[in-house]
Structures are given as C-alpha cells and as structure tokens.
Amino acid sequence: MLFLMLANAAQAGVVIDRIAVIVGRHVIKTSDIVRDLRVTEFLNREPLDLGSAAKRKSAERLIDQEIIRQEIVTGGYRRPSEAEASAFEKQFENDRFHGSAVQLRAAVAKYGIAEELLREQLVWQLTVLRFIDQRFRAGVLVTDDEVKSYYDQNLAALREQNPHGNSLEALQPKIRSTLEGERINQNFNEWLEHEREIYRIEYKQEAFE
C-alpha cells in the first residue's frame, strides 16, 4: 500500500518538502528557500535561478533573517505601522512600475509569486531597516575631524557628484550621514557574525542536492 502511494506520488510529480536548515529551534524548509529565491530575485531584477548554489545563498539569507527576527521579538523593537508599510509598498510600486498595479501583478506572476508574499517581503525589509536603526545607531558618533578627513580624501568625486554647492560646509550633513551609515552597518554586521557563532545552525545537505 505504501509502495503504491509513493509510486503514484512520483508519477504525479509531487515534490516532497524537506528540512534544509535548523536554526536554533526554527526549521527552514526547501519550500521556504524556493519562495525566498523567487521574491528576492524578483526584487533584485535577476533571472530566476533555483539551482543548488542559489539555494545555498538563500539558506544563508534565511538564517540571518531568523536571527534578526528572534532579536526583534526578544528585544521588543518597534515594528512598522500599517500606514508606514502601505506607504513603503506604494513607493515600491511607483518606483518600479510607475504606479501601475497591473504591471506589478504581471511581473510577480512571471516569477511565480503571490502578491501577498511580495507584500510580506517588503514589510520585512522595512522592519529590518527600522531594527538596524533602533539597535545600532545609538552610540555612533562622527566627529568634525572625520567629516573633514572624508571630504579631503574624496574631494574630486564629491565635486563631480555635486557640481553646485560642494564646499565642506555645504556637504557636511551628507558626509556625516554617509559615515554614520557606514558605522551602523559595521556594527550590525559584527553583531550578526557574533550571533551566528552562538546559534545552533545545522544544515541538511541532501536538501541542496
């Protein structure tokens, strides 16, 4: 009886969902990886690739997401409001599809993803951005000397990018914001690397074959 059921499943082309990675107490399945690949490659405007190497990259991305998700929950970090999420979605639609919902639906259909999945991913991106700002901006300090040093070292490029108003005084807010962003990203990456070391992460290699 079991043999017949398995045979029928194989003939019908049924794909068995497997555990791909265990992160702490959370399980990442092969279906999670496929969904992530479809929506990520759609957002990055890349050809759809469901090969083994792409799946491994997706698994690493999902591991990071789970670590971040747990930190957001345990740390009680504020999530975007419904209004903020809707505004972020609308901005994406305007930037990528000139505000056309019809074009957006056609594009997501081409990648085989549901509009709800895209919405979840956009809200998640906004959530991560807010988390990084809340968690890692505190304590970041950029001095006037560092702004001046950056200005001197990148003067040619700054003048090319800002043909009008490229004095140190005019560009100081922009430079300070750039340096702060770099420090925040550095703090975030160091934290994530440390968290990966203390999490239990177990790969099921057969899921990537």
Image (tube, grey):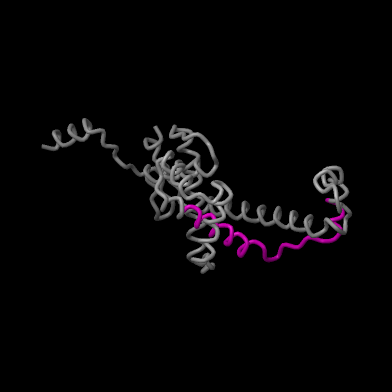
Q: Quadrant of residue 3?
A: top left
| Residue 36 position in % (x across, y down) | 45, 45
Residue 72 position, x and y percent, is 51, 63
Whether residue 188 sits left or right of residue 3 in the image: it is: right
Q: Is residue 165 magenta?
A: no
Residue 159 locus on image (x, y percent): 85, 46
Examine the image and state in which quarter residue 134 appears. Answer: bottom right
Quadrant in which the N terminus appears:
top left
The residue at the point 16 percent across, 37 percent down is 5
Which residue is more in the foreground, 48 or 162? 162
Quadrant containing the C terminus in the rendered view: top left
Where residue 38 appears, as percent x and y from the top left, is: 45, 41
* Left or right, residue 70 beside residue 8: right
Residue drawn at x 53%, y 36% is: 46
Q: Is residue 46 above or below residue 178?
A: above
Instruction: Give the magenta-colored segment's residue range.
Output: 121-150
In terms of depth relative to the viewer, which is nearer, 177 or 183? 177
- Residue located at (74% from left, 54% from top): 178
